[in-house]
């Protein structure tokens, strides 16, 4: 029942008023003990303190999904953007129960697009908005307040700007490292010369002076220097 966007507040208010005056004309549909269709009617009846009229849908999960899509597409006047958002959510579903006679069936974007009467490209656009948009942006497109294409373009531009900013930060950091290289390398070279000189004056071999940790540090420094100069 939550696959489709909720009714706008004004339409929900009208529905509630109609149910208050004339009663619940059409029962909600249940499947597997859960609400399949009729969320707005159920909400209104709850607010009015009315007993909810229900009926049970008989069939498979795939049949139930096809039913809820069919009745909502026919009943609701959704824009292409709104239908694409529904299709994108639908394409994340897996219907059917695991078992020998009832394999689970993942719904593809192509299948969802056909069910909602939109192209696969616009379903991909909706999926991008759902994945990268703020909750408020996603809800605005689902309600029909914002156009899907405009929101997707804004999000992609924002992500491009973020990538460019990250590259600029990395470039500045690289420049800082390069500027520090001469002083760091000179300090290391001077320290190494002192170790060699003092070990010689004391009559000690470098193997005796350097423990495993120091030898590894020198080896790593040599490898890094080779990679830097070779690159």
Image (cartoon, rainbow, N blue to C red):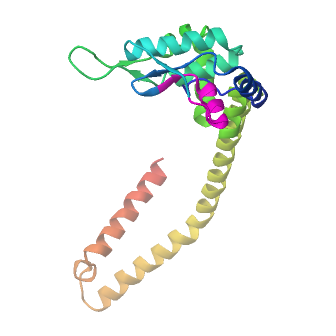
Residue at the spot 23% in from the left edge and 13% down from the top edge: 101
Whether residue 153 appears in this view of the structure is: no
**Looking at this view, is 200 or 102 the one in front?**
102
Residue at the spot 66% in from the left edge and 11% down from the top edge: 75
Q: Position of residue 177 (x, y in %)?
A: 58, 61
**Would residue 151 be found to the left or right of residue 68 on screen?**
right
Image-quadrant location for residue 199: bottom left
Q: Is residue 52 magenta?
A: no
**Looking at this view, is 199 or 88 the one in front?**
88
Residue at the spot 29% in from the left edge and 71% down from the top edge: 215
Q: Residue furthest bottom?
A: 202
**Looking at this view, is 74 or 169 the one in front?**
74
**Would residue 111 be found to the left or right of residue 11 on screen?**
left
Q: Is residue 42 magenta?
A: yes
**Would residue 211 be found to the left or right of residue 117 on screen?**
left
- The segment highlighted magenta reads 35-51
Q: Position of residue 35 (x, y in %)?
A: 49, 26
Count of residue discs: 0
Placement of 93 over or under 75, stated as above or below: below
Image-quadrant location for residue 125: top right
Placement of 111 over or under 192, stated as above or below: above
């Amino acid at each position: 029942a939550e696959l489709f966007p909720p009714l706008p507040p004004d339409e929900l208010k009208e529905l509630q008023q109609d149910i208050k005056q004339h009663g619940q004309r059409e029962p909600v549909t249940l499947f597997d003990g859960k609400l399949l269709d009729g969320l707005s009617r159920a909400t209104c009846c709850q607010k009015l303190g009315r007993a909810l009229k229900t009926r049970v849908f008989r069939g498979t999960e795939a049949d139930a999904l096809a039913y809820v899509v069919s009745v909502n597409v026919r009943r609701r006047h959704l824009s292409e953007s709104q239908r694409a958002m529904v299709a994108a959510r639908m394409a994340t579903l897996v219907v059917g129960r695991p078992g020998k006679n009832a394999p689970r069936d993942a719904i593809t974007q192509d299948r969802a697009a056909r069910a909602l009467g939109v192209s696969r490209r616009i379903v991909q656009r909706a999926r991008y908005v759902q994945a990268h948009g703020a909750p408020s942006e996603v809800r605005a497109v689902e309600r029909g307040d914002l156009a899907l294409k405009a929101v997707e373009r804004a999000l992609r531009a924002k992500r491009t700007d973020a990538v460019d900013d990250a590259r600029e930060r990395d470039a500045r950091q690289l420049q800082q490292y390069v500027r520090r290289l001469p002083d760091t390398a000179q300090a290391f070279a001077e320290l190494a010369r002192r170790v060699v000189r003092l070990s010689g004056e004391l009559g000690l071999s470098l193997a005796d002076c350097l423990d495993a940790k120091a030898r590894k540090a020198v080896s790593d420094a040599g490898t890094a220097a080779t990679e830097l100069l070779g690159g």
